[in-house]
Image (tube, helix red, strand yellow):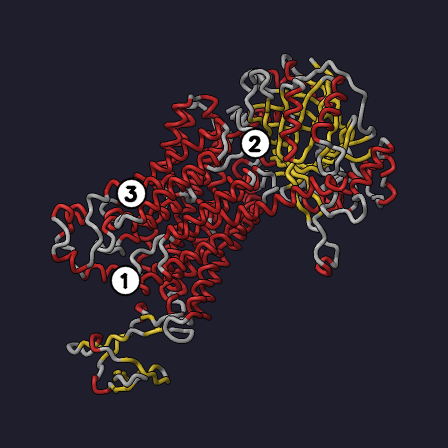
Amino acid sequence: MKRKTSRITTIVHRDLTESVVTSLKNQGVLYYQIEAGRYPVLAKRGLWFFDFYQNHAIIDMPVSILEIICEESSENFLISMIRDAAELNIPGHGSVYSESIELISANQNFYIHSSKEIKKPIGFTGLTGIFCVLPRGSAEPIAKLLLQNGIAVPTISYGTGTGLRDRLGLLRITIPKEKEILKLIVHSSDIEHVLDFMIEVGRLDLPGRGFIFEFPVGHGLLNTKVSLEGPKQAASMDQIISALDQLYGNMEWRKKSNQFRISLRHRNYFEGVNLVLNCKEESMEFVTSALRKVGVTSSTISLKRMAHTGNTDSMFTPAREVANLLIPKKNLPEVIEVLNELEFFDEKFEGIAYTMEIPRAFSYQSKKSNQK
Amino acid sequence: MARNEKEEAIHIGFREALALILPYLQKKIWNQFKSVIWIVLYLSVFQLLVLRIPIKEAGIISFGICAVILGLTFFLEGLFLGLMPLGEALGLKLPQKLGMFSILIFSVLLGMGATLAEPAIAILKACGSKVAPWDAPLLYYLLNGGSDTLYLSIAIGVGISVVIGMFRFLYGFSLSKILVPSVLLLLAVSIYAFFDENLQHISGLAWDSGAVTTGPVTVPLVVALGIGISKVSEKNEQSSAYGVVTLASLFPILAVFLVGIYFSNKVPKPMTEMEFFKHGIHTEQSNFLLGNNAKQYKRQTLESKTQFKQNTTFKEFPTKMVVAFQLALRAILPLSIFLILFLYFILKEKIAYPEEVQLGIVFSILGLTIFNFGIMFGLNQLGDQVGGKLPSTFRSIELTDSIKFIKNFNPKSVYTAVNEEGKEEKFFYLKERKLYSGIPYHEENWNPTNKVYEYIPIHGPIFGKEDNLLGYVIVLAFAFVLGYSATLAEPALSALGNAVEETTVGTFRKSLLIQSVAIGVGFGTLTGILKIVLEIPLIWILVPIYIFLLILNTVSKSEFIEIAWDSAGVTTGPITVPLIIAMGLGIGNQLGTIDGFGILACASAFPILSVLIMGIIVENSRKLSLNDSESKTK
């Protein structure tokens, strides 16, 4: 059984988590996923000539990444509620955006939030998200370049990767599984160039470096805090950008495409669906190994908490593992069959699964096999 | 398990395997090399350039240091592969499967088991032989006859604190609620002890044992367990997993004090050496204090014990290797067997990668063996050499490890010289290679029967006259850098740093934590030495510091409070403890202090301060990211 719903992702500065959670509770949202992450900002400029090369250092701010699954109709309501709770119009407070997902499940309906109130849509449209998996420590230089070029404020979280590693036996310990997940939202017209830029900077065209994909975003309000530097004028650049965004009602004016040099290299993008599996911690290993039989070899796993607002008793264990698997669309029924065989949606795993359309993805592909 | 290894495994040839293993090994060894090299360089440069004494047995020492690096590499890798996943898996499954009571029992057992396995505790006992029973009878008893009681009480202290820590995660109350009362209680007990003749001498031991308990076995395990439990606990909103380590270093202090109070009536009061041997104590007390050795115990035995010369040769390698292996086995194996049995038979759970955990346990044992071995031969030796000679900056010392025996010595060659005050002093000339040097003559070193004169070279004071200020300043500066650079190499801190970086998703960097802790330990060591030099009672240092820390707590964020207090327990491990104790003993012996304890207590109080201050600075920059534009819009 498939069902179209929305996923609202909120990324807020950790000090504001409390207020967002309280308002979620007040609005009767039952469950939300929470994960710790960070967003980098450029540090203040150094003293006098110490900053001769304008070599901005990066400072990391802790953020909480909250995800709520809701009915498509309640999407706008939630977004505006979160905006008010966290005062997201102030740069540095965070972002919120919605994505359209397809829930695959038999009996997890209570997990989806639906509210009776309906609000006008807010936030910008025409946005696209980028999801990029890199080895630990590689996100920082990319984030710095993204910030310096004013492309977007990325969010970085930790995860682990499976793939080639798991087929090596004990030798796998020689390959670090620790990954960094870098997410950012840009205007759709820039997407091609930003993807290209990130592939180039992150050297994703080399084997074992990671992968990148874009995902469609419905509505979104974005963090514009790029630097810690205090304002020299009456308003900081971040504020001006944020104000112009709101004035235009979109981010089109920030289009940067013409600034990037266009890569001549032809890239082999592929498409598919992103299958998101969510289950009890320490049990994803069994799921991914079972999926290997149907050719799903690589996944990115991150640890999250399934928090509940305490309005009812929780049906879930809080410690969760969430895996992002990129699979070709035609393989999906086969994969779902395996999940059902495993009793993934039952008590043993407490599993939740949904898919998102991925129009474009990129990773190193060896010439012989075109396995995705 | 559902996995079918053979079907999926990629065949890897020897050469490809090597291509995977070598860079991996290289990277890991290089990391440890970077952390250890500073302390080694520092000690050698200081000894060669400042103290100007050649390093004895440099070959064996460098061999030992290589062993330390290799051992650390394997040990830490083993921890991450084996013990930490095991601890975290247990932490995840325990609250899901078992009730409160079982968690309680498990935590006590785990805390006690991990503590008894901790290698650094044995060092406390090693210091025991240097305490005179008449100076501090209670201290002497606890370190010798009653050492088993002491260990057990420390272990129970850790066990109780693990229980409290786990309760904290399950019910989600803040660390300060336990921290404030227990610190105040400890300070009160210490102040009470200060006014008791006997207890006064054990407060150093008590605070130090608190610092020593939490080492490279306990810390990663307890932190991993905490991470696991806090993940599944509903009530723990911010899901921080720290704070157990600090409790585990506070409760043992209390335990030692309690044991001390219990025994204080059974031992005699401190007295002079004369009284002790005449009629100072009853037979009953003497039997209790000295055990069966009462009759054999003679004055001079102490003198011989203070000389802890270790003339190591290659012949001792196999025996030391066996000792090191036994230590490692005792530390890791019972604990991991206990954890695995518990996981499989009581929780009936499987681990995701069992072979990885097994390899991790093998790595930890192997690593700890090599590490212990390297510590015995490398760092300890170097530390003892420098520590023992350190007072030569302000005082002349005898270089007991480079005694020369002059054969066929002729007493006729002794001359008489006159010093500034007109007193006569005897000396003779010695030709060494092409140099003639005047050497003071002491009657007692001349053995007329075999015509050998025992010449003990005297070194220092290097800077100016006896007891000069500059010499003391240099010792203090030495103490700071020693504390700082030894901390960089501490394995438990490295493990904690990794855990912190992982749980805060890189917003709290490992390097930042290690740096601020190291600076704190540096200041702590400096203060500890100051305490010995100026003979300041320990409570004069600890009471103000801890009260200040409690005040600082109220303005800090809970995240930083937990990490700061935890890092305090972690700082003093197998690298720092022997080095600091060697230095403390070296200086203490020269100045004639009763016990060299208390430096570790200082060395673990100051990092709390430095991490809290660092936290406040970081917090300010985080506030800036939220507030600067906000204030403008108002």
Compare residues A270 and A139 and report the one nearer the observer. A139
Q: Which mark is residue B238?
A: 2
Q: Which mark is residue B42?
A: none
| Residue A211 visible in image | no
Residue B282, x across and y down, in percent: 12, 49
Residue with the mark numbered 1: B307
Q: Are circles 1 and 3 on residues that touch, CB within 8 Å? A: no
Residue B601, x across and y down, in percent: 40, 50
Q: Are circles 3 and 2 on residues that touch, CB within 8 Å? A: no
Q: Chain of mark 2?
A: B
Secondary structure category for the residue under label 2: loop
Residue with the mark numbered 3: B150
Q: In the rendered structure, which amino acid carries the disc numbered 1? A: Gln
Q: Quadrant of residue A76?
A: top right
Question: Measured along the vertical axis of the image, is residue B486 above or below residue A23?
Answer: below
Secondary structure category for the residue under label 3: helix
Q: In the rendered structure, which amino acid carries the disc numbered 2? A: Gln
Q: Earlier in the sequence, mark 1 or mark 3?
A: 3
Q: Are circles 2 and 1 on residues that touch, CB within 8 Å? A: no
- Between marks 2 and 1 in the image, the one whose residue lies nearer the viewer: 2
Q: Earlier in the sequence, mark 3 or mark 2?
A: 3
Q: Quadrant of residue B97?
A: top left
Identify the residue at image location x=68%, y=39%: A39
